[in-house]
């Protein structure tokens, strides 16, 4: 199973300018329809403001995520997830991240999941500071993703066979 999501975030402290826009692809596995794990592969565009100078950096992050579907029924879904990861390829700002997010979706015709959470960035060098960010996450469709793994199988309908007429060979 997999999930594709977009994320935007902003630093909770006004005095440090930092924002990010992410696109994440998360292959994973769902155990029992409620518990799931995944490996988020994220392309991130991080925006920095330092001493009035605005810069940006593209970043590739990889991590581990786990979650639990609290409610999963025909009318919607509510899910909690946590993730941990770090910079794999970056030019200047190497960091680890810790992520907590709640997601929910409805049973409308188009079934997106929307999430709200927090992410903590721990800087691994002297080029940046640790940051606590508010994130908003959107998963375009809950079918085919990690967050809606409930699959129903319909029972097989027995086919009634016509009785044989006497004298005709059975095929």
Image (tube, rainbow, N blue to C red):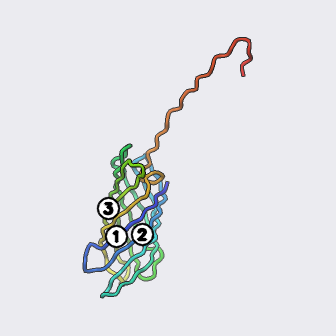
- Residue identified by numbered label 3: 116
Left/right of residue 28 with respect to residue 130 in the rendered view:
right
Above-or-below relation of 118 to 19: above
**In the structure shown, which secondary structural element does the residue marked by tag 1 occupy?**
strand
- Residue identified by numbered label 1: 9
- Residue identified by numbered label 2: 22
Q: Are marks 1 and 2 in contact (CB under 8 Å)?
A: yes
| Pointer 3 or 1: first along the chain | 1
Q: Are marks 3 and 1 in contact (CB under 8 Å)?
A: no
Instruction: Give how far across and how far down residue 157 sits, in percent.
Output: 53, 29
Q: Which residue is drawn at 35% across and 81% down?
A: 48
Instruction: Give how far across and how far down residue 118 sits, in percent.
Output: 31, 66
**The C terminus, quarter of image:** top right
Q: How far apart are marks 2 and 3 (CA)?
A: 14 Å
Q: How far apart are marks 1 and 2 (CA)?
A: 9 Å
Question: Most extreme residue toward the left, as rendered?
Answer: 14
**In the structure shown, which secondary structural element does the residue marked by tag 3 occupy?**
strand
């Amino acid at each position: 199973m997999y999930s594709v999501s977009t994320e935007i975030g902003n630093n909770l402290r006004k005095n440090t300018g930092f924002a990010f826009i992410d696109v994440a692809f998360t292959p994973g596995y769902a155990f029992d329809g409620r518990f799931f794990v995944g490996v988020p592969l994220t392309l991130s565009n991080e925006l920095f403001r330092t001493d009035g100078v605005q810069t940006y950096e593209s970043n590739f992050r990889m991590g581990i995520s786990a979650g639990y579907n609290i409610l999963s029924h025909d009318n919607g879904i509510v899910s909690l997830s946590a993730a941990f990861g770090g910079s794999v390829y970056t030019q200047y700002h190497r960091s680890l991240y810790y992520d907590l997010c709640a997601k929910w979706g409805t049973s409308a015709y188009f079934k997106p999941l929307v999430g709200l959470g927090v992410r903590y960035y721990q800087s691994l060098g002297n080029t940046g500071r640790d940051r606590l960010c508010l994130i908003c996450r959107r998963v375009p469709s809950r079918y085919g993703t990690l967050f809606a793994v409930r699959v129903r199988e319909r029972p097989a309908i027995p086919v009634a066979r016509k009785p044989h007429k006497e004298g005709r060979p059975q095929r």
